[in-house]
Image (tube, coloured by chain):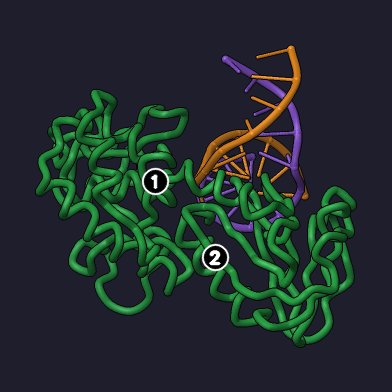
Chain colours: A green, B orange, C purple
Amino acid sequence: MPEGHTIHRTAGLLSSMFAGSELHVSSPQGRFAPGAALVDGRALTTVDAWGKHLFAAFDLPAGQPRHLHIHLGLYGKFAMGDGDAPPVRGALRARLEGGGHWADLRGPIVCEVITDEEKDAVTRLLGPDPLRRDADPDRAWKRLSRSGISVGQLLMDQKVLAGVGNVYRAELLFRGEVSPFRAGRDLTPDDWDSAWVDLVALMKRGVKAGRIVTTRPEDRARRSGVVTVADSHYVYRRTGLPCRRCGELVRTEVMAGRNLFWCARCQVS
DNA sequence: GCTAAATGTTGAT
DNA sequence: TCAACCTTTAGCT
């Protein structure tokens, strides 16, 4: 489930497994072989996430390509474990081994080794990431509050806000009782302040849980115990089902190239 | 067991 | 506008 929470969680796991260790970096599939050779045998120093981008830094001189840059895209996924790595099967883009651990990467849309300058060029194009301590919500507000484009589209724009994907878009707007069709410039400063606070809390929770859960206990069918998949969202992928708050049927429509879900009664304007 | 769709983005047409 | 990435899951039969 690669929205920002997945990337930050992965960064934390990779860091705890590998930071300080020399890694054997390979590309069994071959597509990442040239990049792997640049960092193979070097120690991993830090792992950094910004939005949906992950950067693992290796102990190499500045100026040389030394950041492993990964974007999972829609299918990309890490598998990790302790001890010896399992036998290679299928399309395995990259394998990291060292410090008694291994990590396998499959299906990413980006897997490359880049320089400091190239890393800066990537992050410069990203809006504030709610999961970063250095995030400045005013940067997002400046863009949102000047735009005639709908908030449903703006939230998906990584230049506005980094790390939000289709699930957080739908759920954040529902929780804030904001219509996805409202123009950014029609948001009030209070709307944005509370949305940012809510988003930070939701995404932190996503990192901890390893999945997106946005429902409050009182809005779930099962109010105690484990939160089931069916109970974890208000509107995302709930087309035609009754809204958990008002009973109106959840609607769907394509917006910004993706399926948007919303309750037309709870999210009037 | 099979098929379609999915949390995202880029690059070709 | 569409294919690619090529995994995982939900929903059928």
The residue sitting at 79% across, 75% down in the picture is A23
Q: Is residue A97 above or below residue A57?
A: below
Residue where numbered disc 2 is placed: A48
Residue type pointed to by label 2? Asp
Direction from residue A79 to residue A172 in the image, left or right? left
Q: Is residue A167 above or below residue A255?
A: below
Q: Amino acid at mark 1?
A: Gly
Please tell me whether mark 1 sits on a helix, a strand or a loop.
loop
Q: Left or right: where does residue A127 sit relative to residue A243?
A: right
Tag of residue A127: 1
x and y, in percent, of residue A175 in the image = 21, 52
Pick the front one: A172 or A39: A39
Closer-to-camera residue (A97/A223)? A97
Residue for point 71% across, 69% down: A58
Q: Residue at x 45, y 62 (%)?
A: A5
Q: Could you say where residue A200 lies in the image, as x and y percent from the top left?
A: 30, 62
Is B1 displayed left or right of A139 in the figure?
A: right
Q: Secondary structure at mark 2?
A: strand
**Are tags 1 and 2 found on a single chain?**
yes
Which residue is rendered at x = 60% and y = 46% of the image?
Answer: A73
Q: Quadrant of the C terminus of chain A?
A: top left
Q: Residues within 10 Å of mark 1 (few under 14, many from 20)?
A: many
Q: Position of residue A231 (x, y in %)?
A: 34, 61
User: Could you say which quadrant of the image residue A129 lies in?
Assistant: bottom left
Using the image, name the chain to which the residue with label 2 belongs.
A
